[in-house]
Image: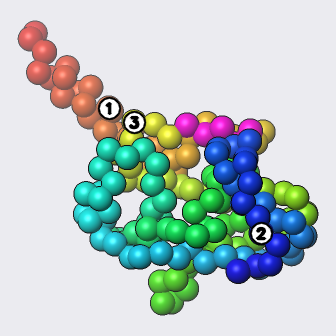
Amino acid sequence: MFPGLIIRSSSIHAAGCYTTRPIKAGIRICEYDGPRLSKAVADARYEGRSVTYLFACGDNLVIDGFGTAMFFNHSCDPNCETEQDEEGRVYICTMRDVAAGEELTYEYNLHDSDEDNQDCYCGATACRNTMFSDYELKRRARNAKRKAAELAAAAPA
Ligand SMILES: [Zn+2]
């Protein structure tokens, strides 16, 4: 892990991860580590819980995060991104130079969520107001459209 990371309260959400030192772009700062679970096991374990630290990696695998990585908040204008190596290990890396004192964030790109919404309060100028990925938003729009069509078809003439 990169030295100088601290966890403290965040204006985005609860606690966040901050750096006390400047970090150059392209540095692996932290591994998103934790037990690997299948999606089914994770869903069963966390059913009804609104706060989880699950990181989807691969088709049917999630990392049940613990440690520093789980404190990274989502931002629509992030300074970090995640990258996965050949062994399936996931790292959080800086995507631009980060100044000392900045909160470290990455784009969650949430998908396959059972939540109705995942509002974003990151405060970025370009905030999308949701932590869902574009793909997930499209999928949801499609589903809503299909449902509306089904309801219309089922309605008495
Ligand atoms: Zn946002």
Reading the image, the residue beneath label 1 is 145
* Helix, strand or loop status at disc 2: strand
Which sits earlier in the primary sequence, circle 1 or circle 2?
2
Callout count: 3
Q: Quadrant of the C terminus?
A: top left
Q: Nearer the viewer, mark 2 or mark 3?
A: 2
47 magenta-colored = no
Which residue is painted at 55% across and 46% down in the image? 131
Q: CA distance from mark 2 to mark 3?
A: 33 Å
Q: Position of residue 48 (x, y in %)?
A: 32, 44
Which residue is painted at 89% across and 70% down in the image? 21
Q: Which residues are magenta?
A: 119-123
Which amino acid lies under the numbered mark 2 shown in the image of this protein?
A: Leu
Image quarter for residue 130? Answer: top right
Q: Nearer the viewer, mark 1 or mark 3?
A: 3
Reading the image, the residue beneath label 3 is 116
Which amino acid lies under the numbered mark 3 shown in the image of this protein?
A: Asp
For label 3, the crowd category at 10 Å Cα-Cα, with few meaning under 14, some 14 to 19 and many 20 or more, is: few
For label 2, the crowd category at 10 Å Cα-Cα, with few meaning under 14, some 14 to 19 and many 20 or more, is: some
The label shown at residue 5 is 2
Q: Position of residue 105 (x, y in %)?
A: 70, 58
Q: Position of residue 100 (x, y in %)?
A: 90, 63
Q: Quadrant of the N terminus?
A: bottom right
Q: CA distance from mark 1 to mark 2?
A: 45 Å
The label shown at residue 153 is none
Q: CA distance from mark 1 to mark 3?
A: 16 Å
